[in-house]
Image (cartoon, grey):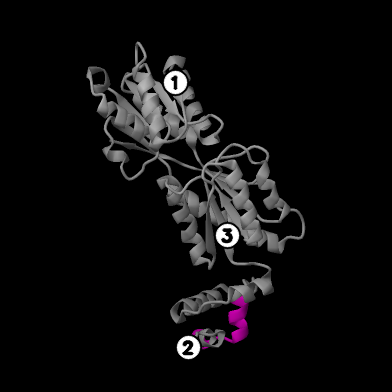
């Protein structure tokens, strides 16, 4: 037999009207009463009819999460953080894959608008953001994660890429090294641009030149890391220290070094960015910049929920976009 609002009310010792007010996020409910009702909902296993709630509140209780690809530990860990917060608030998540293609991304945005989601969290696939304006036109709040875009303003949760890269380089420089190579992703993407900026700032502050011949850029996949390290090691005077701005690039670079072991590659030291499950056992790795991936997802979800509430409470224009940068940490291997 299905659990009803009346069952919840009896369990919590309140009226059915009070339960309904809690379910509809009435701000006039006392915190202690709200907590008691929510606890009773969990214990009784009550499930609210989403369609009925949507008619009453103009909300669907769903949030869209759009990521560049699904086969990526970073994106999925962020997604886990998002879902962790939204689940406790009674929201469902529609996960969409942009397949690293702006056209797919625009198509998924249209789908989410059709689904009448209450908000969208996006890890952009590129620096282009003009197609996100359809979300604003539909009155749907947006929070960006990891990357910023051009042509669209929204709240954002980012890692402190510049200081993270700077700290890693500072650590390598302290060992007495004076030549550093760099392997990174497209400079059109804000996160990779910032990591390169941190790399350059550290060299500049310590009076070390940036050698263009040992600076390599590609995409963010394993094969690119392999090929870029191959290019680096093919230089007449390759560096012994390399900063690699992405976990998958580092995996590919390490694969090349292992397959092409020599006296030249044996002394390579790598500083990487992204503390994934296998980071600590990758050969040649001496330092890893760890991003708070789960926390980035949680914070994005919290910011989106705030925007959804503001949208309900405010008749005027919403506050300007907010930017949150979360600290990175250094892990030595």
For the residues labelled 3 and 1, the Cα–Cα distance comes to 40 Å
Closer-to-camera residue (324/296): 296
Instruction: For mark 3, give the secondary structure.
Output: strand
Instruction: For mark 1, give the secondary structure.
Output: strand
Q: Which mark is residue 1?
A: 2
Q: Within the magenta stretch, is there residue 20? A: yes
For the residues labelled 2 and 3, the Cα–Cα distance comes to 29 Å
Q: Are marks 1 and 2 in contact (CB under 8 Å)?
A: no
Q: Is residue 319 left or right of residue 127?
A: right
**Residue linked to disc 1:** 215
Above or below 252: residue 29: below
Above or below 244: residue 38: below
Check disc 3: other Cα within 10 Å, few if <14, some if 14-19, many if 20+: many
Image spot of residue 115 (x, y percent): 63, 62
Q: Are marks 3 and 1 in contact (CB under 8 Å)?
A: no
State whether residue 190 appears in this view: yes
For the residues labelled 1 and 2, the Cα–Cα distance comes to 66 Å
Please report whichever mark, 1 or 2, sits nearer to the chain's N-terminal start.
Answer: 2
Q: Which mark is residue 63?
A: 3
Image spot of residue 320 (x, y percent): 69, 47
Closer-to-camera residue (200/222): 222
What is the span of residues highlighted in magenta in the rendered image? 10-22
Q: Is residue 95 left or right of residue 53?
A: left
Which residue occupies 46% across, 60% down?
A: 84
């Amino acid at each position: 037999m299905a659990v009803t609002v009346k069952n919840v009310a009896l369990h919590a010792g309140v009226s059915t009207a009070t339960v309904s007010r809690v379910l509809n996020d009435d701000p006039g409910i006392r915190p202690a009463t709200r907590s008691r009702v929510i606890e009773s909902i969990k214990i009784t296993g009550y499930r609210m009819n989403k369609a009925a709630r949507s008619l009453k509140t103009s909300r669907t209780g769903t949030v869209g999460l759009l990521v560049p690809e699904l086969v990526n530990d970073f994106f999925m860990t962020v997604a886990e953080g998002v879902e962790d917060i939204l689940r406790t608030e009674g929201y469902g998540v529609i996960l969409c894959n942009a397949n690293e293609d702006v056209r797919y991304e625009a198509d998924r945005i249209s789908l989410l608008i059709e689904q009448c989601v209450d908000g969208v969290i996006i890890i952009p696939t590129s620096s282009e953001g003009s197609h996100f304006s359809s979300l604003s036109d539909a009155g749907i709040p947006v929070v960006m994660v990891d990357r910023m875009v051009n042509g669209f303003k929204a709240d954002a949760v980012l890692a402190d890429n510049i200081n993270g890269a700077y700290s890693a380089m500072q650590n390598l420089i302290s060992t007495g090294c004076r030549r550093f190579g760099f392997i990174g992703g497209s400079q059109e993407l804000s996160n990779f641009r910032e990591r390169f900026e941190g790399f350059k700032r550290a060299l500049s502050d310590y009076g070390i030149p940036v050698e263009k011949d040992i600076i390599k850029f590609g995409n963010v996949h394993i094969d690119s890391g392999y090929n870029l390290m191959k290019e680096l090691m093919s230089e007449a005077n390759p560096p012994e220290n390399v900063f690699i701005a992405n976990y998958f690039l580092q995996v590919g670079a390490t694969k090349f070094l292992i397959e092409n072991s020599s006296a030249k590659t044996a002394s390579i030291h790598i500083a990487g960015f992204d503390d994934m499950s296998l980071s600590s056992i990758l050969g040649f790795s001496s330092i890893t910049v760890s991003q708070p991936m789960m926390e980035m997802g949680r914070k994005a979800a919290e910011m989106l929920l705030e925007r959804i509430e503001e949208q309900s409470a405010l008749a005027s224009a919403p506050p300007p976009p907010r930017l949150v940068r979360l600290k990175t940490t250094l892990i030595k291997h």
